[in-house]
Amino acid sequence: MTTVIKKARKTGIEYKFNEYENLIALKDYVDGTYDQHYSQTKYQSTDFILDCGHGEGFCLGNVLKYVQRYGRKEGKNRADLLKVLHYALIALHVHDQQEEK
């Protein structure tokens, strides 16, 4: 269980917008991406893109892609919103790495 979820559970925060449940759903979604066929090796394609220095643009481009796709392809697909959040998390990772330099 992540630190955020543990902290929320300990503090007894009563979320108004199902953030707790959605954080768990996001974690489950992200965990599931590590079992998908394209991530069976040690490295995912995202690793190579980040290593080439294109991480920020790649992540933000995918956020835009899935935001625009939501409601159009396969209707209002919850998975598209989870992808938006996942790519935003990766963008945060890229940001934090760049700020450490």
Image (cartoon, rainbow, N blue to C red):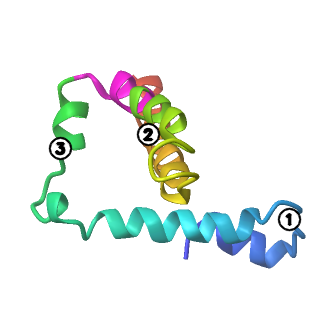
Alpha carbons under labels 1 and 2: distance apart: 25 Å
In three-dimensional space, the C-alpha distance between marks 1 and 3, rounded to whole angstroms, equals 35 Å
Kind of residue sitting beneath label 1 = Tyr
Label 1 sits on a secondary structure element that is loop
Q: Residue at x 69, y 71 (%)?
A: 21
Q: Which residue is mark 3?
A: 45
Q: CA distance from mark 2 to mark 3?
A: 16 Å
Labels 1 and 2: the sequence-earlier one:
1
Predominant SS along the magenta part: helix
Question: Does residue 82 sit above or below 48 in this rendering?
Answer: below
Query: In this picture, which residue range is highlighted in magenta?
Result: 53-60
Q: Is residue 32 above or below residue 79?
A: below
Side (left or right) of 82 relative to 19: left
Instruction: Please say if 46 is above or below 33.
Output: above
Disc 1 or 3, which lies upstream in sequence?
1
- Depth order, front residue of 49/2: 49
Q: Are marks 1 and 3 in contact (CB under 8 Å)?
A: no
Residue occupied by mark 1: 15
Residue type for callout 2: His
Q: Which quadrant is home to the N terminus?
A: bottom right
First in sequence: mark 2 vs mark 3: 3
Could you tell me which secondary element the residue under label 3 belongs to? helix
The residue sitting at 18% across, 60% down in the picture is 39
Using a 10 Å C-alpha cutoff, classify the residue at mark 1 as few (fewer than 14 neighbours), some (14 to 19) or many (20 or more).
Answer: few
**Label 2, residues with CA under 10 Å away: few <14, some 14-19, many ≥20:** some
**Judging from the image, what secondary structure is the residue with disc 2 in?**
helix
Residue 11 is inside the magenta segment? no
Q: In this figure, which residue is indicated by the disc labeled 2?
A: 93
